Amino acid sequence: MSKNRFRPVAIPKEVQVTTTRTIIKAAGPLGKLEQRICPKTLVVIEQDKLLVQAIDNTKQAAAEQGTMRKLAMNLIEGVLKGFEKTLVIEGTGYRAQMSGAGLQLFLGYVKPRTVALPAGVKCELKVVKSAEKGDLTYITLKGIDKQQIGDIAALIKKTRKPDPYRHKGVRYADEVLRKKIGKRAVVQA
């Protein structure tokens, strides 16, 4: 088991954290968030630090202690700085645009796919012209809830997964794809 679960989480001066037995709430410059506390853990606030303690000495309680500590860290970081995730659309004719219903994705299907964006998520689009790869569209999702940003990014990526031969599709900006060689290249070698 990781020893990080015993380390306290620092609470910055700009963030107010309150806790009950079942819920932890954080308020900061970017907004308010709350998280349900795992049943086998106890969250204690001492001065400017937050401690997560396991109620009993079992493997499950230790795992929940580490998970709850990381969730509390994400809560504090989200209301203080926020989170962002960037996706890249690559392919000829593939593009994205904002619409009233959310984000419209034109990915080679007969009709455009629409992904609804929740109220707490902001989306920015940027098109970069590239000679060898064509137009690349960068989608940047910003918000205070890390889980919500990750869920929306996964939903957008799922609309058209990257092709292993030509890398056409939607991928994360920091994702490294292994390119497969085609049958013709294998036969000639």
Image (spheres, rainbow, N blue to C red):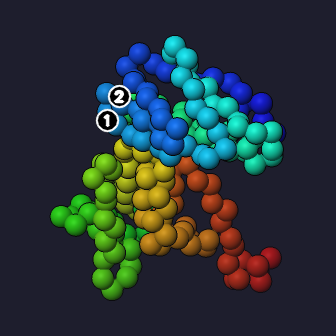
Residue occupying the point 38% across, 74% down: 107
Residue at the spot 49% in from the left edge and 70% down from the top edge: 158
Residue 26: horizontal and vertical position, in percent?
A: 41, 32
Horizontal side, residue 60 vs residue 70: left or right: right
* Residue 49 placement: quadrant: top right
**Label number found at residue 51:** none
Picture quarter with the C terminus: bottom right
Residue picked out by circle 1:
31
Residue type highlighted by circle 1: Gly
Residue 93, given in percent of the width and then of the height, sits at 35, 72
Residue projecting furthest to the left? 100
Whether residue 93 appears in this view of the structure is: no
Decide if residue 36 is on the left or right side of residue 99: right
Q: Which residue is mark 2?
A: 28
Q: Position of residue 37 (x, y in %)?
A: 55, 43
Task: Judge whether 37 appears above or below 137 on screen.
Answer: above
Q: Amino acid at mark 2?
A: Gly
Marks 2/1 in contact by CB < 8 Å: the verdict is: yes
Q: Is residue 102 visible?
A: yes
